[in-house]
Amino acid sequence: MFDVVQVHQSPAKFAALGTETARFRLTEQVIASIGTGFTTHLNANTVWREIGRIEAGVVFATSDQVITVEASNIYEARIVVADHALVGFYLPVEKTFVTVSPSMPLKTIPVQQNE
């Protein structure tokens, strides 16, 4: 038998963007915790593009790495940013938000659309 660890999820209404607006490059690796005992790593030098918004912040996606959050299950995720900090993850399949505790300041540089 094993312990079941669940991700605390809150319903999130996602509003997609018609066009991409903001893009940034993450200049330092981020290791985030959602309180399950597993961490999510955001690699340095990944490029993130704004894809929408939820109440908690702006949702960004990348094609440079696969982002997941983990408990007893593994969930596909997008990052949620507010005030230049990672505040959580949007889980697109479940349509929920998972909080990062504590929020993590992000070191970024802007990226042009054609980069």
Image: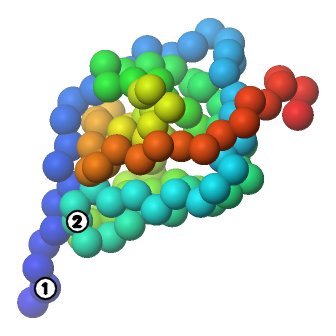
Task: Point out which mark residue 36 bears.
Answer: 2
Query: The C terminus is located in which quarter?
Result: top right
- Tell me what residue is drawn at x 31 percent, y 19 percent: 55
Local crowd size for mark 1, using a 10 Å CA cut-off: few (<14), some (14–19), many (≥20): few
Q: Label 1 is placed on what type of residue?
A: Phe
Would residue 51 be seen by someone viewing this image from the given angle?
yes
Image color mode? rainbow
Residue named by callout 1: 2
Location of the N terminus by quadrant is: bottom left
**SS under mark 2:** loop
Instruction: Please tell me whether residue 17 is drawn above or below residue 4 in the rendered image.
Output: above
Vertical order, 75 against 5 (above or below): above
| Mark closest to the chain's N terminus, 2 or 1 | 1
Picture coordinates of residue 98, whole percent (x, y):
28, 43
Q: Residue furthest bottom?
A: 1
Label 1: element kind: loop
> Alpha carbon of mark 2 to alpha carbon of mark 1: how far?
14 Å
Crowding near the residue tagged with mark 2, few <14, some 14–19, many ≥20 C-alpha atoms within 10 Å: some
Provide residue 97's location: percent of width, then percent of height.
29, 37
- What type is the residue that disc 2 sits on? Thr
Horizontally, is 66 left or right of 35 in the view? right
**Which mark is in front, 2 or 1?**
2
